[in-house]
Amino acid sequence: MQALLAPLKELAEYDEVRKIVRQGKGTVALSGCVDSQKLHMIYGLSDGLKYKVIVTYNDLKAKEIYEEYRFYDRNVMLYPAKDLIFFQADIQGNLLIRQRMCAVKALLEQKELTVVTSIDGCMDYLMPLE
């Protein structure tokens, strides 16, 4: 995967943004990337970090990002939001619950992981470990 990072490392701005991300001081906003470049940039900027969270605006986009990001990182899990429409919940059975529990289990057991979720997934309340 180092071949994918080589073009990014040639950019001066990439090094500056990477330093800011590593310091953890504040937020970084990047613009000008088309959809196909966003995941490549996320992968490059987060290279070497243990845990990464990618948050998007809805579950459909989260699933799309999850499928595409698996090309860059094999340790990626989808954390879907709770389904508020009971009709859809009945159709899908316990698939959403199973995906959510697999993501939580992976967070507890794995040393490196990327979690893809929607903003609704971030709003879910989880019980403390105690």
Image: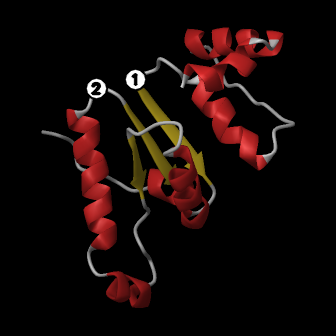
In the image, 25 versus 22, the foreground residue is 22
Residue 53 vertical placement versus 121 (above, below): above
Q: Is residue 109 visible?
A: yes
Q: Amino acid at mark 1?
A: Lys
The residue that label 2 is drawn on is: 111
Q: Amino acid at mark 2?
A: Lys
Q: Position of residue 102 (x, y in %)?
A: 26, 53
The quadrant holding residue 86 is bottom left
Answer with left or right where residue 102 lies relative to residue 63: left
Residue 23 vertical placement versus 35 (above, below): above
In the image, 72 versus 91, the foreground residue is 72
- Secondary structure at badge 1 equals loop
Residue 42 vertical placement versus 50 (above, below): below
Tell me which label, 1 or 2, sits earlier in the chain: 1
In the image, 84 versus 9, the foreground residue is 9
Answer with left or right where residue 108 lies relative to residue 117: left
Q: Residue at x 44, y 63 (%)?
A: 81
**Residue 50: image tag:** 1
Q: Are marks 1 and 2 in contact (CB under 8 Å)?
A: yes
- Secondary structure at badge 2 equals loop
Q: Residue at x 31, y 60 (%)?
A: 99
